[in-house]
């Protein structure tokens, strides 16, 4: 019996058994490696947090708020990037574009059916704008007339004021340029019906002339929505596509009942040194607050008034009392997340706080992370900021490790649709068939120490020389510039049809829709078309040009930020 173990070891070590043991050992090792690898991948997938778009590092505030590109417009410190700028230029929704062939094919079918039937109509009766033949003729004529835009969707025609007129709306975007999103136009069509019942479009009116086709907003009680983004037209990436030209419903949300108010939990930021800073600084801090509110599943109580920095004002002074809705799309924001105006909130709070024993949790140190507040049950969390800069900036809350936890919801902030409608109005006046040049002069042109060649390179003669082989003679050229005297560019008119933003000031003048809409937001007082609005519209029109030429990339060898900064900007 004692010899059996030894005999077993001898048999196991025989040559014919060594191969089997080796294969068994290799299989065990491979299985172990596979299990460990699967475990590592699972841990990484569960804990990985991507960087906060559009910035590479949320902790690097200098990189976030300043440009690292020599591009004149995209990196301009004046105009802030918003959600629609993050959308890809080739939106997947463009797969549904309507072509003239589509309209012609359908129209041909309708004509054949009409010709095979008896033609009987009363010339005194108004035209039936919902007749498929009328609709297809209008659609085909619009596509043929406006060759420089992509049509995405046509609305149903509606009767115009005259018996032979119909109004029709459509969604579109320019075929060329770097702009994203859609615009909406609605125009009046004059239509003729011949004796054999065929219809033809005689003329198409000006931009937004077909007011009867403008979509009317349904009554909305503006109750506070839930925390999940509202549904809407979206691309496959989950971003809803912005459209200018629609009626804007950006009235303040209201709480429908006491029960609804006390059920919610709220977050508010008060004080701090962010007031009257640049728009980029404001948005960087505001989105930190909004990101924390969403992380904590709380309603953000926001101040609807801004202090506009002196860099944007004609008085060169900081100006308080500017409405958030002058610059940003509040309708989209209130539909996509839970926000409440702070004046309304404090009215509700004073009314129901004692009765319902609502409680407040005060935080006075920005280093208290959002993670530490997740278990706070108080009705209101108030972050209070002091007087010492930069520790009293709101964005300090989202620095460090918090940057990977609280994501700034960039997709919720868009440019004001009223301002974007001005862009669409000017572009439509030019039939979206123009080239664009962005010319920086002003203080930089006068500072020859930092920009030694800029003044000369942007002079009329130098511009004519630079652009002569790049832009064809007679082309529409939109010039976006900070040069106050547009007569400075008079020599360019001999070669090009030049256009400036001020050429279209009637679009925001005292008889315009923009003027009346913004005055309503401002308690009836007129609103100035300020420097930030002007720079935004100018930049957006530049980006829609078929050919685009920028100052520091195309017109001069000087660096955007001064001598010897080009290499730094490019790195």
Image (cartoon, rainbow, N blue to C red):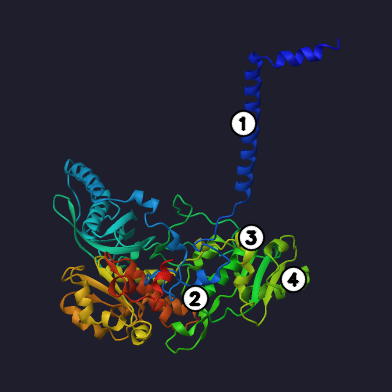
Dot 2: within a 10 Å radius of its alpha carbon, few (fewer than 14), some, or many (20 or more) residues? many
Q: Which residue is mark 2?
A: 279
Which of labels 2 and 1 is toward the front? 1
Q: Secondary structure at mark 1?
A: helix
How many discs mark residues in the rendered view? 4
Rounded to the nearest whole Å, what is the CA distance between mark 3 and mark 2?
24 Å
Q: Which residue is mark 1?
A: 30
State which tag comes first along the sequence, 4 or 1. Answer: 1
Q: Is residue 409 above or below residue 525?
A: above
Which of labels 4 and 2 is toward the front? 2
Q: Which residue is mark 3?
A: 295
Rounded to the nearest whole Å, what is the CA distance between mark 4 and mark 3?
19 Å
State which tag comes first along the sequence, 1 or 3. Answer: 1
Q: Is residue 136 above or below residue 435?
A: above
Expressed as whole percent of the image width and height from the top left, the position of residue 469 reads 18, 68
Rounded to the nearest whole Å, what is the CA distance between mark 2 and mark 1?
57 Å
State which tag comes first along the sequence, 2 or 1. Answer: 1
Q: Residue at x 62, y 39 (%)?
A: 38
Quarter-wise, where is residue 391 in the image? bottom right
Q: Is residue 124 above or below residue 303?
A: above
Front position in the image: 373 or 352: 373
């Amino acid at each position: 019996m004692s010899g059996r173990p030894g005999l077993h070891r001898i048999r196991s070590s025989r040559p014919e058994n060594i191969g089997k043991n080796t294969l068994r050992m290799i299989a065990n090792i491979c299985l172990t490696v596979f299990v460990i690898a699967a475990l590592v991948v699972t841990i990484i997938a569960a804990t990985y947090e991507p960087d906060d778009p559009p910035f590479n590092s949320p902790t690097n505030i200098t990189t976030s708020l300043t440009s690292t590109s020599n591009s004149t417009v995209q990196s301009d410190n004046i105009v802030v990037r918003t959600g629609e700028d993050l959308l890809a230029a080739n939106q997947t929704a463009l797969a549904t574009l309507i072509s003239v062939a589509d309209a012609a094919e359908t129209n041909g079918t309708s004509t054949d059916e009409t010709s095979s039937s008896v033609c009987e109509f009363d010339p005194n009766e108004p035209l039936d704008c919902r007749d498929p033949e009328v609709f297809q003729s209008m659609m085909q004529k619009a596509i043929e007339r406006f060759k420089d835009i992509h049509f995405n969707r046509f609305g149903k025609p509606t009767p115009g004021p005259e018996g032979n007129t119909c109004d029709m709306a459509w969604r579109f975007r320019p075929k060329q340029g770097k702009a994203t999103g859609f615009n909406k136009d609605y125009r009046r069509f004059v239509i003729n019906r011949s004796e054999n019942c065929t219809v033809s479009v005689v003329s198409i009116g000006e931009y937004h002339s077909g007011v009867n086709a403008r979509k009317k907003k349904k009554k909305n009680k503006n109750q506070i929505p839930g925390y999940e983004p509202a549904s809407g037209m979206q691309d496959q990436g989950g971003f809803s596509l912005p459209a200018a030209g629609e009626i804007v419903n950006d009235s303040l949300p209201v709480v429908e009942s006491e029960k609804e108010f006390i059920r919610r939990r709220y977050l508010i930021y008060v004080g701090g040194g962010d007031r009257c800073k640049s728009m980029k600084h404001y948005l960087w801090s505001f989105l930190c607050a909004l990101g924390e509110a969403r992380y904590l599943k709380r309603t953000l109580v926001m101040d609807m008034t801004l202090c506009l920095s002196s860099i944007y004002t004609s008085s060169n002074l900081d100006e308080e009392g500017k409405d958030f809705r002058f610059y940003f799309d509040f309708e989209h924001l209130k539909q996509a997340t839970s926000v409440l105006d702070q004046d309304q909130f404090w009215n509700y709070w004073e009314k129901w706080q004692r009765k319902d024993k609502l409680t407040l949790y005060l935080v006075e140190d920005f280093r208290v992370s959002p993670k530490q507040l997740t278990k706070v049950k108080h009705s209101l969390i108030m972050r209070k900021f002091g007087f010492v800069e930069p520790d009293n900036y709101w964005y300090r809350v989202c620095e460090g490790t918090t940057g990977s936890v609280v994501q700034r919801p960039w997709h919720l902030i868009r440019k004001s649709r009223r301002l974007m409608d001005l862009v669409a109005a000017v572009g439509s006046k030019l039939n979206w068939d123009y080239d664009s040049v962005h010319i920086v002069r002003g203080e930089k042109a006068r500072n020859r120490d930092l920009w030694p060649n800029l003044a000369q390179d942007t002079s009329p003669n130098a511009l004519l020389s630079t652009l002569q082989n790049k832009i064809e003679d007679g082309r529409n050229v939109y010039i976006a510039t900070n040069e106050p005297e547009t007569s400075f560019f008079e020599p360019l008119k001999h070669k090009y049809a030049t256009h400036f933003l001020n050429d279209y000031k009637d679009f925001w003048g005292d008889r315009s829709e923009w003027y009346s809409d913004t005055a309503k937001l401002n308690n009836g007082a007129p609103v100035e078309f300020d420097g930030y609005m002007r720079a935004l519209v100018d930049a957006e029109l530049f980006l829609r040009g078929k050919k685009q030429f920028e100052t520091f990339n195309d017109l001069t060898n000087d660096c955007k930020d001064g001598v010897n900064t080009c290499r730094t900007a490019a790195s």
